[in-house]
Image: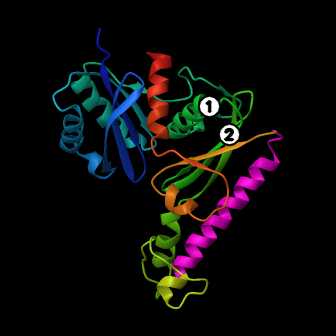
Amino acid sequence: MATEHFFVVDVGNTSTHVGLACGKRIVKQGRMTTREGREERNIKALLRKLAAGRAVKDAVLCSVVPGLNPLWEQVLHKLCGRSPLMIGHRIRLNFRIDYPQPETIGADRLADAAAAWDRYQGAVVVADFGTALTFDVITGDGRYVGGVIAPGLPLMTEYMAERTALLPQIGLGGRFGNIGRSTNEAMRIGSMVGYRGMVREILEHIKAGMKERRIRFCATGGYAGLALKGLNTPVEILPELTLDGLVLLREWNR
């Protein structure tokens, strides 16, 4: 019997990442802004484009925007014929949660942790570079023990532009020297170099409290490559980590 196709959906604060999976593999991907995902027609258009005429019988939904959950659940139910698997701390996980308030852990963080533990089977720190920057910590014996939450890279430049009269909104890419020769270059240095410093310090702070012989570091999220460039710390960047976690959690729960 042929393996069925299913959707995996990661609704973030700024961007929504959707994949079409078959078995244990993501075969197609698409993105939309989360604002676009407030319209049923936009959601259906993206899902139908990914399906491309295939019969899709199931879905997994991971969301950090609770207000959009009913709409996504409704659309996925219509297209798949069943309610999607909602990611949360009560579903079956491939790791143990050792955390005082597990209901407060974001669904995306659970998916990241599931994929990271499956990949490394050992102590790992997972960083997700989105609107917020999250670090999640899994111990060598497979316990999720918590993490760190910091502002995401785009928030740094946006906040400066919003809260000052003369500083402009700048793009995050582009070259810069050691000393800024313009306002834009000075802001870019402050954002990019300062951000790398923050990441490095947080990572060292986490590792100091883990007491593990070997700790892996992996990263995902739309800003991971940009933020980690020049960090000089061993890191594996895995752009599909969250979607891979959703595929894995479906296997564990369906």
* Disc number placed over residue 131 in the picture, else none: none
In this rendering, the answer to whether 104 lies above or below 177 is above
Q: Position of residue 84 (x, y in %)?
A: 36, 25
The residue wearing badge 1 is 117
Q: How is the image coloured?
A: rainbow
Tell me the residue at 61%/66% (across/down). 195
Q: Secondary structure at mark 1?
A: helix
- Is residue 200 inside the magenta stretch? yes
Residue for badge 2: 124
**20 relative to 95 in the view: left or right:** left
Q: Residue furthest top?
A: 1
Instruction: Please determine whether, in this image, residue 85 is positioned above or below residue 174.
Output: above
Q: Which type of secondary structure does the marked residue at label 2 adopt?
A: strand
| Spot occupied by residue 133 in the image (x, y as percentages of width and height) | 56, 54
Instruction: Find out whether residue 250 is within the magenta segment.
Output: no
Amino acid at circle 1? Trp
- Looking at the rendered structure, the kind of residue marked 2 is Val
* Disc with the residue nearer the chain's start (2 vs 1): 1
Among the 4 quarters of the image, the one containing residue 233 = bottom right
Magenta stretch mostly in which secondary structure? helix
Q: Residue at x 56, y 83 (%)?
A: 177
Q: What's the CA distance linking mark 2 and mark 1?
A: 7 Å
Instruction: Give the residue at x 54% y 33%.
Output: 115
Crowdedness near tag 1: few (<14), some (14–19) or many (≥20) residues, C-alpha within 10 Å? many
Q: Which residues are magenta?
A: 187-212
Q: Residue at x 40, y 54 (%)?
A: 14
Q: Nearer the viewer, residue 245 or 176?
A: 176
Image position of 70 (left or right of 241): left
Kindly check if marks 2 and 1 are in contact, taking CB atoms under 8 A apart as contact: yes
